[in-house]
Image (tube, rainbow, N blue to C red):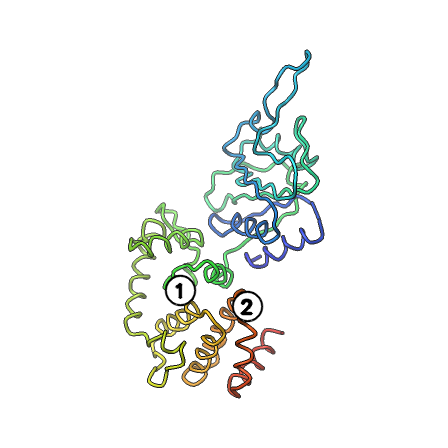
Amino acid sequence: MTPNALFDYLSSLVSHDIKISVMLWGAPGVGKSSVVAQVANARNLEFVDVRLSQLAPTDLRGLPVPENGVSRWFPPEFLPQSGQGVLFLDELNMAPPTMQGMAQQLILDRKVGSYVLPDGWFVWAAGNRKEDRASVFDMPAPLANRFLHLEVESDLESFKRYGLERNLHEQILAFLSFRPNLLHAMDSKHPAWASPRSWEMASKLLKAGLEIAPVVGAGAQAEFDAFCEVYAALPALEQILEGNYQAAEFPSEPSARYATVIGLISRVETGEHAFHAMRWLSSVAGHEWLNLFAVDCFPKLRTRGQLGAFTTLALTDSSIQGFLKEFRALVGI
């Protein structure tokens, strides 16, 4: 499933208070951990991330302390003692079998040693697959049978939604819209390769004026640099958003068209901005570019509380009304 679908699925588990343990599978860097953290944040849940591969069995069970002639196990401070939240066991299958066996009691019985997990906590875990060159151990069958298993795959629409919400560099979002195959492209010959996680790191480097090859690889950097050259020929996007677009022409080269549309989406802050952008696109571009704009811009407007303002303005333009009618039929709303 896509990261967006995973977010909805995990959110539904929380809404219905279903505390079946969940195991997320997927290639490194697809966003498994990020989605879990997003769900916890959206639901106002505490989030405890435990990397089992970095622990010894005694780190999880606690230390034995003599008390009245009997050993009592003192649990580690990172295990929750109260409240509500998500206990996330990341890199579960990178832990050796002895550690996975110790975690099995926590996953199955919601306790380990003398420690008992509070009722308000969900137990979710994640791991990589052997085919992704990850250094993992086989998960014991009894442990695997305790989980609800979900497979996560990289997805451009999910990444764009995530990137727009977190203000990732617009040139990266535009480039990946043009070259979606580079969103996740593992390279067994080099340590740096493209993934949603590495593109997020690349955004930080790019904003600092640094090269992105150290995180996405030299090949991806070369293609990205060539793509960025088209930005010099883009129309004045700020003027379009303000409604001053009489002389603005839509580029003819496909990469420049992607750059223009994503650039507009990244700069939209108000319903008025979105209205002017769609009005211009409806006069110079085909519906495929309007669809691309709408799919990514409407969630952004909804998050900012600007969708109503856009709708009010759209009612004054017959061409936009016609497009929105077709768009609703296309997406089923």
Which corner quadrant of the image does residue 168 belong to?
Answer: bottom left
**Disc on res. 305:** 2
In the figure, 67 relative to 104: above or below?
A: above
Residue of label 1: 179
Which corner quadrant of the image does residue 141 belong to?
Answer: top right
- Residue 97: where, in percent of width, then height? 57, 31
In the figure, 82 relative to 252: above or below?
A: above
Residue that extends furthest to the top in the rendered view of this protein: 69
Drawn side of residue 223 relative to residue 297, left or right? left
Of residue 39 and residue 238, the one placed in the foreground of this image is: 238
Q: Quadrant of the C terminus?
A: bottom right
- Residue 101: where, in percent of width, then height? 62, 31
- Residue 107: where, in percent of width, then height? 65, 37
Query: Callout 2 environment at 10 Å: few (<14), some (14 to 19), or many (20+)?
Result: few
Residue at x-position 47% and y-position 75%: 274
Query: Under tag 1, what secondary structure?
Result: loop
Residue at x-position 51% and y-position 43%: 130
Residue that extends furthest to the bottom in the rendered view of this protein: 318
Among the two numbered marks 1 and 2 on one chain, the one whose residue lies closer to the N terminus: 1
Query: Under tag 2, what secondary structure?
Result: loop
Query: Callout 1 environment at 10 Å: few (<14), some (14 to 19), or many (20+)?
Result: some
Circle 1 or circle 2, nearest the eye: 2
Drawn side of residue 258 relative to residue 301, left or right? left
Of residue 111 and residue 165, the one placed in the foreground of this image is: 165
Residue at x-position 69% and y-position 45%: 20
Q: Amino acid at mark 1?
A: Arg
**Disc on res. 65:** none
Q: Amino acid at mark 2?
A: Gly
Residue at x-position 47% and y-position 42%: 134
